[in-house]
Amino acid sequence: ANLQAKFTNREDSIRQLKQRRAVLIATLRRQTYGYLLAKRTAAQARLAAAERPKGVLIRYRELLRDAARDEATLTRLETERQALALEQARKQEPWELISKPTLLDRPVAPKKGRIMALGLLAGLVAGCGAALVADRRSGRVFSEDELQQLLPGPLLAQLDPQAPSGELSLLARGALAGSHRVALVPVGLAPKAPAVQRLLSQLQHQLPHTELHCSADLVGAAGCDHQLLITSLGSATRSQLASLRQQLNLQGRPITGWLLLAHQPPADAAA
């Protein structure tokens, strides 16, 4: 500005300064453009580097979840391992032998003979007790002595229907001789039972002229000359025998006696 006040535009110094100014302006413009272009390129590069595809982000989140889950599992397993190690350490024997034990020539226990004897005795007692309880619960009479106490009249004979004996013949020729009607009253046995029918057939053979009446009905047996009770061990119950004695007392007629057959199934079992 000072030179322009003193000189005209044709002066060499003024022209040189203007040329220098134009060069500096062009240089500054070029450098500024290059700097801004470089800054824009760097910013675009950073923007491109920051961008990620959608699938990559989803996979990244999945990996984070897997890592967190694996870490939690690892922590739990380590805790369980420590607890197991403590439990195993607690179960270990806190003592140990410091000397060799002394062993006897013969074992002290268990004594097999004593165990077998005690087991046999206990089984025998338990079996007897169970049999007694079963006998009491069933109410059946399995003893001949008890039958003689509960049944009225004498025991005339013990018979085996499978093998006829002379006792039946003696009975037919003795107490039943000359009888017109004889009543056979089964006690605890079915009148149609095979054993009762065989006995009836054998007695009919011994008394061909005698009418034999086989029934548990005491009303029909009241008109007969003789009344014979037929039973076997385990067939009649105590309640049946008590009821029979009561009915005979009401009937008012004595019985001739009773016959004991070999063991037969009870009437309900035979039916």
Image: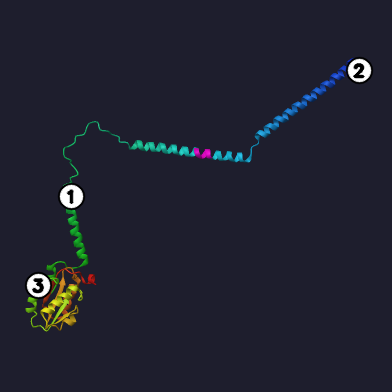
- Quarter of the rendering occupied by the N terminus: top right
In the rendered structure, find residue 116 and report the number of the disc placed on it. 1
Given residues 214 and 79, the one toward you in this image is: 214
2 with respect to 198 (left or right): right
- SS state under label 1: helix
Over which residues does the magenta segment extend? 66-70
The residue carrying mark 2 is 5
Q: Does the image show residue 205?
A: yes
47 with respect to 260 (left or right): right
Report the residue at 21% width, 63% height from top: 134
- Quarter of the rendering occupied by the C terminus: bottom left
Q: Quadrant of residue 108?
A: top left
Local packing at callout 3 (Cα closer than 10 Å; few below 14, some 14-19, many 20+) is: few
Determine whether label 1 and label 2 are within 8 Å by CB. Answer: no
Could you say where residue 11 lies in the image, as x and y percent from the top left? 91, 16
Report the residue at 19% width, 58% height from top: 127
Question: Is 69 colored magenta in this rendering?
Answer: yes
